[in-house]
Image (tube, rainbow, N blue to C red):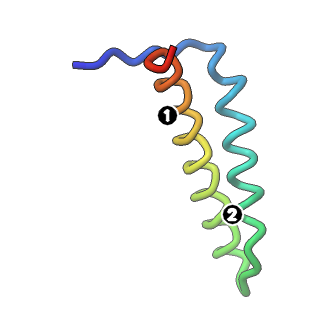
Amino acid sequence: MPAIHFNLYDLTLFLPMAVAGALLVGGIPVATRSTRYGLRAVGAVAGALVAFLVVEALPVLV
């Protein structure tokens, strides 16, 4: 079972990546406000997942 290397300092990467994802995906022009909020939430989750993959892949690459 792979070990997950996560500590509190990784939030310095997670939060900006989640905000960037929310801004990039939330910038898609849509007609309704609820769809825009949904897209922002999906973008934030996608950004956090990318940050998680980066944090977990760096020890493997080094």
Q: Is residue 8 above or below residue 44?
A: above
User: Label 1 crowding class (10 Å Cα cut-off): few <14, some 14-19, many 20+?
Assistant: few
Q: Which x, y percent locates residue 22?
A: 71, 54
- Tell me the CA gap for discs 1 and 2: 19 Å
Which of the pair 39/57 is nearer the observer? 57
Residue marked by disc 1 = 53
Q: Residue furthest left?
A: 1
The quadrant holding residue 23 is: bottom right
Q: Nearer the viewer, mark 1 or mark 2?
A: 1
* Label 1 element class: helix
Which of the pair 40/46 is nearer the observer? 46
Q: Which x, y percent locates residue 24?
A: 74, 59
Quarter holding the N terminus?
Answer: top left
Residue name at image x 28 percent, y 19 percent:
2
Residue marked by disc 2 = 25
Query: What amino acid is at disc 2?
Result: Val
Q: Is residue 54 above or below residue 21?
A: above
In the image: residue 42, left or right of residue 28: left
Q: Is residue 12 above or below residue 23?
A: above
Query: What amino acid is at disc 1?
Result: Leu
The quadrant holding residue 18 is: top right
Residue name at image x 47 percent, y 24 percent:
56
* Label 2 element class: helix
Residue name at image x 59 percent, y 35 percent:
51
Disc sitting over residue 31 in the figure: none
User: Label 2 crowding class (10 Å Cα cut-off): few <14, some 14-19, many 20+?
Assistant: many
In the image: residue 24, left or right of residue 34: right
In the image: residue 7, left or right of residue 28: left
In the image: residue 27, left or right of residue 62: right
Residue name at image x 69 percent, y 63 percent:
25
Q: Which x, y percent locates residue 58?
A: 53, 21
Q: Which x, y percent locates residue 38?
A: 61, 66
